[in-house]
């Protein structure tokens, strides 16, 4: 099975899938958290990664934009190997500047929002466009305000993150990522730190984004969201992809024992 | 009218008992003891002729003393500036990925923190004995150490480089106080490391860096007295020159001390308000300033108001 996937992975460097992981391995010291992950995310596809904590979902997500280095296998984003240059038979880690350029294409939303608390909402949004894309303030501001409007926070441009609710902060974080005009969005448990009544407003923004055709990889415990929005659900456990398929198949009719046990505990 | 008075009556029935706050006799006694001791101290200061208050009055605005204050302030500002700039560089080096860079910063900090600043000052002052000519290892550069290392440059190097070691620890603590998620979020947006440090991490670290830096500035002002040993004409040395001639040691030390107190008090007030300014992001409401506390105390303990409450 892994041989066939590696073959297809080798062929998929062109304008094929948006993200492709082939036999990706990652360890923290002795602890191996990713034990050879094969995954493909097509353009415009919404993929939800589910699984128990410690299964490697978040680590896999962080490998996609090279917040984590990998120890084996390869990760492609938009046809290019992420974080490494192939020279002969060796993959050399890229200089930081080049990794930064690749990350422009990949938006990321964190569990704890990670907004910049010393800047107001608008400044949070235009900081990276100005520093990284060297964009002029007026054009960045115009796009930022339009994005804030689309996440329902047009009136909060001058507010500071501490003055916002968790749900509002996470919507700002999504707008901040979108302000870089990414080709793909990564969500790392975007609603896990929120009060239950605030989860809905964030999920709505994510649904709108999915409907607009954005490629999304979402690590989540929101099974309803996965069922409603995901084109594909990937169940991970203990560093492996155990099972994947449509939400109906994986969540509605799981085949693997571990998937069944996990879903029984969360549903 | 009758309709108005009726509800008033029921209200006064509830109001019949007035509330009396607890008395604290212990507080009054301890305050009285402290005031008494304070008065004793004040009496000895005023009546002991050895303080030589008239001499103090004579020299307090002496030209050389005022010039000494100027040198003291100048040294404080220059040495703090060197300390802060070099301290930030050292702090960033301390958390660098390169172990050699990290160790170099660590070695610097341990050397300058591990030796008394007085010894360092004497070393700089006697640098010519160690390196008679300074070449920096560059051909063609040959500077006479005796000409370069004046008492003032020795003082600036000694105090400034020593201060950098302490500032680096303060800045490092500030940088470490900013949670890692901030750098990660900046990295995920494609912001490079230098920009992340400058735009994201350091501005947030300021809240932790500012208060101890204010302390250090006040400490530096007093530490400048040390350079009197290498005959820099700062405040203490200026006083020493005068009493070496007139033998009015205590009055002139009083002159110097009074000026140190005046300047450090001004710096303390400044520090207090700078700290308050940088605390704004962190707390929902700021604690009252001493002035506000005093006004509140007067309002609460106002005898007229108390009388009114008893009625």
Image: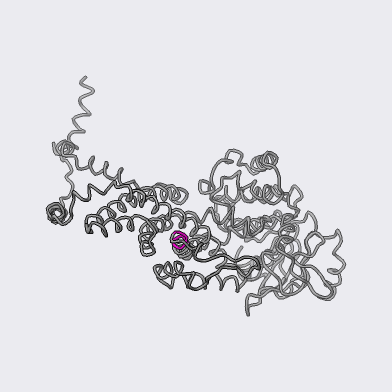
- Please indicate whether residue A203 sits to the left or right of residue B218 in the image: right
Can I make out residue B202 in this image?
Answer: yes
Labels in figure, total: 0
Where is residue B241, by image quadrant? bottom left
Q: Answer whether residue B153 is magenta in the image.
A: yes
The image quarter containing residue A92 is bottom right
Vertical placement of residue B14 versus A195, above or below: above
- Where residue A103 sits in the image (x, y, percent)? 72, 58
Q: Is residue A79 magenta?
A: no
Residue in the picture at 45% in, 54% down = B210
Measured as percent of width and height from the top left, residue B52 is found at 18, 53
Q: Residue A214 location, x and y as percent?
A: 75, 51
Q: Is residue B254 left or right of residue A54?
A: left
**Residue B276 image offset from top left, x and y in percent:** 41, 48
Magenta stretch bounds: B152-156
Q: Residue at x 86, y 72 (%)?
A: A7
Q: Nearer the viewer, residue A70 or B61?
A: B61
Nearest the camera: B201 or A24?
B201
Q: Quadrant of the N terminus of chain B?
A: top left
- Residue A113 in view of the camera: no
Q: Is residue A264 left or right of residue A241?
A: left
User: Looking at this view, is A244 or B110 the one in front?
Assistant: B110
As drawn, the residue found furthest toward the bottom would be A30
Q: Quadrant of the C terminus of chain B?
A: top left
| Magenta stretch, overall SS | helix
Q: Nearer the viewer, residue A235 or B77?
A: B77
């Amino acid at each position: 099975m892994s041989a066939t996937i590696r073959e297809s992975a080798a062929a998929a460097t062109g304008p094929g899938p948006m993200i492709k992981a082939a036999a990706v391995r990652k360890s923290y010291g002795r602890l191996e958290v990713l034990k050879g992950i094969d995954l493909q995310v097509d353009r415009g596809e919404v993929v939800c990664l589910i699984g128990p904590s410690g299964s490697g979902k978040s680590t896999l997500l962080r490998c996609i934009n090279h917040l984590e280095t990998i120890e084996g296998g390869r990760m492609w984003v938009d046809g290019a190997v992420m974080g490494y240059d192939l020279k002969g038979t060796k993959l050399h880690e890229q200089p930081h500047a080049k990794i930064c350029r690749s990350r422009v294409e990949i938006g990321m939303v964190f569990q704890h929002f990670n907004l910049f608390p010393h800047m107001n909402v608008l400044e949070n949004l235009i900081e990276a466009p100005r520093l990284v894309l060297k964009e002029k303030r007026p054009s960045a501001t115009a796009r930022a305000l339009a994005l804030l409007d689309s996440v329902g926070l047009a009136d909060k441009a001058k507010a500071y993150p501490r003055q916002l609710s968790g749900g509002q902060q996470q919507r700002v974080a999504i707008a901040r990522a979108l302000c870089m005009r990414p080709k793909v969005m990564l969500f790392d448990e975007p609603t896990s730190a929120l009060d239950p009544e605030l989860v809905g407003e964030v999920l709505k923004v994510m649904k709108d984004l999915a409907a607009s055709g954005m490629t999304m990889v979402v690590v989540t415990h929101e099974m309803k969201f996965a069922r409603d929005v995901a084109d594909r659900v990937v169940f991970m456990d203990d560093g492996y992809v155990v099972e994947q398929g449509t939400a109906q198949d994986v969540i509605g009719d799981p085949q693997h024992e571990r998937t069944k046990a996990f879903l029984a505990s969360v549903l | 009218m009758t309709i108005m008075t009726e509800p008033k009556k029921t209200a006064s029935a509830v109001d019949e008992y007035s509330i009396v706050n607890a008395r604290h006799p212990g507080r009054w006694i301890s305050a009285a003891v402290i005031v008494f001791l304070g008065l004793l101290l004040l009496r000895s200061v005023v009546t002991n002729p050895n303080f030589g208050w008239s001499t103090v009055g004579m020299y307090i605005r002496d030209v050389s003393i005022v010039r000494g204050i100027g040198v003291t302030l100048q040294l404080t500002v220059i040495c703090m500036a060197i300390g802060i700039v070099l301290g930030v560089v050292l702090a960033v080096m301390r958390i660098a990925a390169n172990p050699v860079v990290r160790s170099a910063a660590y070695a610097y900090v341990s050397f300058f923190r591990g030796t008394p600043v007085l010894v360092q000052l004497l070393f700089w002052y006697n640098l010519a004995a160690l390196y008679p000519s300074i070449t920096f290892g560059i051909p063609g550069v040959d500077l006479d150490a005796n000409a370069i290392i004046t008492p003032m440059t020795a003082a600036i190097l000694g105090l400034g480089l020593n201060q950098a070691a302490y500032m680096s620890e303060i800045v490092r603590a500030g940088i470490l106080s900013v949670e890692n998620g901030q750098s990660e979020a900046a990295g995920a947006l494609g912001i490079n490391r230098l920009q992340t440090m400058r735009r994201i991490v350091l501005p947030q670290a300021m809240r932790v860096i500012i208060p101890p830096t204010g302390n250090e500035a006040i400490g530096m002002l007093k530490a400048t007295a040390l350079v009197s040993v290498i005959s820099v004409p700062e405040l203490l040395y200026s006083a020493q020159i005068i009493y070496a001639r007139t033998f009015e040691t205590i009055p002139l030390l009083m002159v110097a001390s009074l000026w140190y107190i005046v300047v450090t008090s001004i710096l303390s007030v400044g520090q207090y308000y700078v700290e308050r300014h940088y605390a704004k992001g962190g707390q929902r409401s700021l604690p009252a300033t001493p002035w506000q506390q005093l006004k509140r105390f007067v309002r609460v303990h106002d005898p007229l108001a108390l009388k009114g409450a008893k009625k």
